[in-house]
Amino acid sequence: MAELHGLERKSVQGSGEQEEKYVFKASRWTAGNLLFPVRIEITPRHVLRVTPRFFGADEESIAMAKVASVNIRTGLIWSEIRIDSSGGSNPIVSHGHRKRDAQRIRELIERFQPNVPGPESRASTPESRE
């Protein structure tokens, strides 16, 4: 596992198969991340925000199929990421990530999201003709 600018790529063993897992750590130099920097973990199945604490951690997750949008707000050095859910739950918000990491998070989410048919493919389905 090589760490490169807050990014780790791991292969996770689970039920006999390997799953990709990408971990992005927020910078300790940003507000709220000094002692316990927030981590965003991306797998083909979900997006997870982990906030470590003295005892345990808080975790928020959104299933990859339920991700509605990814919003990146960039500053001079750091970016804020907002991942909205189509299921009506609270969005995952994290600040203090490098711009490059924020863009990589969006690319991974777009890559792992299931292919949703567009409006042109729905026009040819039997349900749309009724």
Image: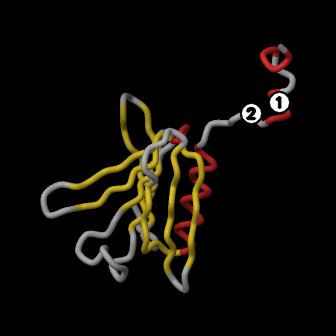
SS type, badge 2:
loop
Quadrant of image for the C terminus: top right
Label placed on residue 19: none
Q: Position of residue 68 (x, y in %)?
A: 59, 46
Left or right placement of residue 36 versus residue 110 in this view: left
Residue on which the image places disc 1: 121
What residue appears at the point 34 percent right and 65 percent down from the top-left corner? Answer: 38
In the picture shown, does residue 80 fall above or below 88? below
Colour mapping used in the image: secondary structure
Quadrant of image for the N terminus: bottom left
Query: In the picture, residue 99 is in which quadrant?
Result: bottom right
SS type, badge 1:
helix
Left or right placement of residue 62 versus residue 111 in this view: left
In the picture shown, does residue 99 fall above or below 57? below
* Amino acid type assigned to the residue bearing label 2 in the image: Pro
* Amino acid type assigned to the residue bearing label 1 in the image: Ser
Instruction: Pick out the residue farthest to the left.
Output: 55
What residue appears at the point 36 percent right and 34 percent down from the top-left corner? Answer: 14
What residue appears at the point 55 percent right and 86 percent down from the top-left corner? Answer: 76
Q: Position of residue 37 (x, y in %)?
A: 31, 69
- Which of these two is toward me, 29 or 87? 87
In the picture shown, does residue 40 fall above or below 123? below
Report the Cα–Cα distance between label 1 and label 2: 6 Å
In the picture shown, does residue 112 fall above or below 9? above
Q: Position of residue 39 (x, y in %)?
A: 37, 61
Total residue callouts: 2
Query: In the picture, residue 113 is in which quadrant?
Result: top right
Q: Position of residue 58 (x, y in %)?
A: 26, 54
Label placed on residue 117: 2
What residue appears at the point 51 percent right and 60 percent down from the top-left corner? Answer: 82
Q: Are marks 1 and 2 in contact (CB under 8 Å)?
A: yes
